[in-house]
Image (cartoon, rainbow, N blue to C red):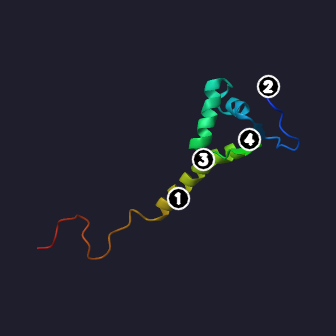
Amino acid sequence: MAKDAVPPPPGFPEDGLWGARAIAVFLYGGDRVRETRRVHWLENHSKLPFFRLGGTLCLRRSAIKGWEKAPEEEAAKTDETVADSGSNADPPEGKDETPGTSEI
């Protein structure tokens, strides 16, 4: 924790990140001004599960890890749905596969 950082309140979750600097270290590996600004930009422009306690930006490690897994799980569900839809099925009876052709 930085010298000027305010400690988290009692009862704050163990996996919680208290303040933009701590979040910047977790996400980017540094707490320089550039990384801290990126955290504030993410708060305003992303769907990351940030929250504020008394004006201090917070994030839970478990929430961010769950947030990372959600798109992967959604993609897997979509892949299963496409595979089950039978996209390679034969065309209905009386319908020609090739458009623009007709019987003479």
Label 2 packing within 10 angstroms: few (<14), some (14-19), many (20+): few
Q: Nearer the viewer, residue 49 or 91?
A: 49
Q: Looking at the image, is mark 1 or mark 2 earlier in the sequence?
A: 2
Could you say which quadrant of the image residue 23 lies in? top right
Residue 35, relative to residue 74: is it above or below? above
Q: Amino acid at mark 1?
A: Glu
**Distance CA(mark 3)–CA(mark 1):** 25 Å
* Residue at the limit of the structure toward the left, as seen here: 104
Assess whether mark 2 and mark 3 are in contact (beta carbons under 8 angstroms). no
Label 1 or label 2, whichever lies nearer to me, is 2
Mark linked to residue 80 = 1
Q: Residue at x 46, y 65 (%)?
A: 85
Residue at x-position 67% and y-position 47%: 49
Indicate which disc residue 4 carries: 2
Q: Nearer the viewer, mark 3 or mark 1?
A: 3
Q: Earlier in the sequence, mark 3 or mark 1?
A: 3
Q: Which mark is residue 47?
A: 3
Q: What residue is pinned by disc 4?
A: 55
Residue at point 58%, 49% (across, down): 71
Q: Is residue 88 left or right of residue 101?
A: right
Q: Residues within 10 Å of mark 3 (few under 14, many from 20)?
A: few
Residue 62 x %, y %: 73, 44
Marks 1/2: CA–CA distance: 51 Å
User: Which mark is first along the chain, 2 or 4?
Assistant: 2
Tell me what residue is drawn at x 66 percent, y 23 percent: 32
Q: Secondary structure at mark 2?
A: loop
> Horizontal placement of 59 versus 77: left or right?
right
Closer to the camera in the image, 7 or 81: 7
